[in-house]
Image: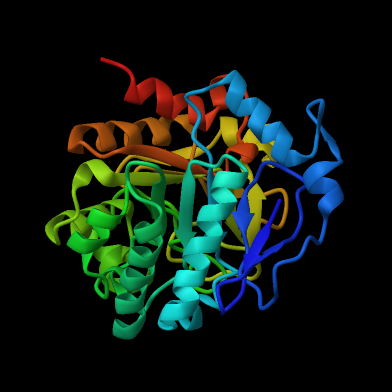
């Protein structure tokens, strides 16, 4: 299921094919695009995805469901929406009504990313508009943000912390097709000084983002650290700092068994990788249960709010499950 939001704050229903509730921002008005999938398509014995989610919640009352707005490729309307007070308030009312109608527990704002002082100010005002009609006592309000200071430095973090229930810190996508060299895309710690100095691209880490948030007044118990349930590959590369030809993503569940079983874990940065010598994928960066356990111990030691996974649908079963590894470690003595 996918809902979109206009620059004037109106919503548009898009597609309801799976339980991956990522809502896109498009210029459009409120109208049903795939009413069949929302309300007629049989999903887990129910008519429509909305009914299936409602059934899931009735079976597991502890589950909280939030509608997520935006995403990496669906955030271009956020600047105009957040800059327009009337549009922001309209959106807040509409999303509140949507949550009540469909029994969602709140909303997640995934604006990628407010990167200017003006965008940072408007981001905070936008959250305030939502919180005004979705009070703490009735709704959850969360937001996904990167670890990079290029974004975080523009936000009034103590105010953001007051408005949000949790901040979902995206501890991934540090490297990819947009970077000059390849590297671990979800490392907990920064690499060695030599690699840092030669390749500034590789300085990003989960720890750096967490440290910046805490140092600037964001309560650690509201920080939820993100785990990628997918790999990034860099063609023809053999390790961090190498140039590459071609890149892409592979869901963790779709990785060859050999890659997961024989993954090399770099304990110095808490990251795993595999070099594809038989094919064309080159250096492949991903998390495995042992690196997730390291991140979970880190989160637990610092008193963070926990871990989240993007996305759980990409996980593997049994001993190779990343979600299980994180849950087990967080709940161990």
| Residue under the image location 72 percent in, 35 percent down | 51
Q: Position of residue 260 (x, y in %)?
A: 58, 34
| Residue under the image location 46 percent in, 79 percent down | 86
Number of marks drawn: 0
In this picture, residue 90 sits left or right of residue 47: left
Residue sitting nearer the eye, 175 or 165 = 165
Q: Quadrant of residue 42?
A: top right
Q: Quadrant of residue 281?
A: bottom right
Residue sitting nearer the eye, 173 or 195 = 173
Residue 122 makes an appearance in the image: yes
Residue sitting nearer the eye, 125 or 161 = 125
Instruction: Give the quadrant of the C terminus.
Output: top left
In this picture, residue 175 sits left or right of residue 293: right
| Residue under the image location 80 percent in, 43 percent down | 39
In this picture, residue 118 sits left or right of residue 279: left
In the rendered image, the vertical position of residue 226 relative to residue 204, given as above or below: above
In the rendered image, the vertical position of residue 142 relative to residue 296, given as above or below: below
In the rendered image, the vertical position of residue 21 relative to residue 51, given as above or below: below
In the rendered image, the vertical position of residue 161 relative to residue 224, given as above or below: below
Q: Position of residue 73 (x, y in %)?
A: 60, 69
Q: Position of residue 224 (x, y in %)?
A: 34, 44
| Residue under the image location 46 percent in, 60 percent down | 109
Q: Position of residue 193 (x, y in %)?
A: 22, 62
């Amino acid at each position: 299921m996918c809902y979109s939001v206009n620059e004037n704050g109106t919503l548009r229903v898009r597609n309801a094919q799976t339980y991956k509730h990522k809502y896109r921002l498009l210029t459009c008005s409120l109208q049903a695009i795939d009413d069949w999938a929302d309300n007629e398509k049989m999903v887990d014995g129910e008519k429509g995805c909305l009914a299936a989610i409602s059934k899931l919640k009735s079976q597991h009352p502890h589950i909280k469901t939030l509608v997520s707005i935006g995403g990496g490729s669906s955030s271009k309307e956020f600047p105009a929406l957040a800059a327009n007070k009337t549009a922001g308030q309209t959106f807040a009312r509409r999303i509140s009504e949507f949550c009540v109608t469909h029994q969602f527990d709140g909303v997640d704002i995934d604006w990628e990313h407010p990167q200017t002082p003006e965008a940072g100010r408007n981001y905070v005002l936008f959250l305030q508009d939502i919180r005004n009609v979705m009070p703490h006592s009735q709704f959850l309000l969360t937001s996904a943000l990167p670890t990079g200071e290029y974004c975080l430095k523009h936000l009034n973090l103590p105010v953001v912390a007051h408005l949000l229930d949790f901040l979902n810190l995206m501890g991934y996508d540090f490297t990819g097709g947009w970077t000059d060299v390849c590297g671990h895309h979800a490392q907990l710690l920064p690499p060695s000084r030599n690699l840092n100095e030669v390749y500034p691209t590789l300085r990003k880490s989960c720890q750096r983002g967490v440290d910046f948030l805490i140092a600037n007044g964001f309560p650690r118990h509201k920080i939820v650290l993100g785990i990628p349930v997918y790999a990034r590959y860099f063609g023809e590369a053999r390790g961090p700092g190498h140039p590459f030809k071609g890149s892409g993503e592979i869901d963790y569940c779709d990785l060859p068994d050999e890659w997961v079983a024989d993954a090399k874990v770099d304990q110095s940065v808490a990251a795993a990788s595999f070099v594809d010598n038989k094919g064309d994928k080159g250096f492949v960066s991903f998390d495995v249960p042992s690196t997730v356990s390291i991140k979970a111990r880190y989160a637990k030691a610092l008193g963070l709010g926990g871990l989240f996974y993007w996305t759980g649908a990409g996980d593997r079963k049994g001993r190779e499950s990343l979600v299980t590894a994180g849950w087990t470690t967080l709940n161990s003595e």
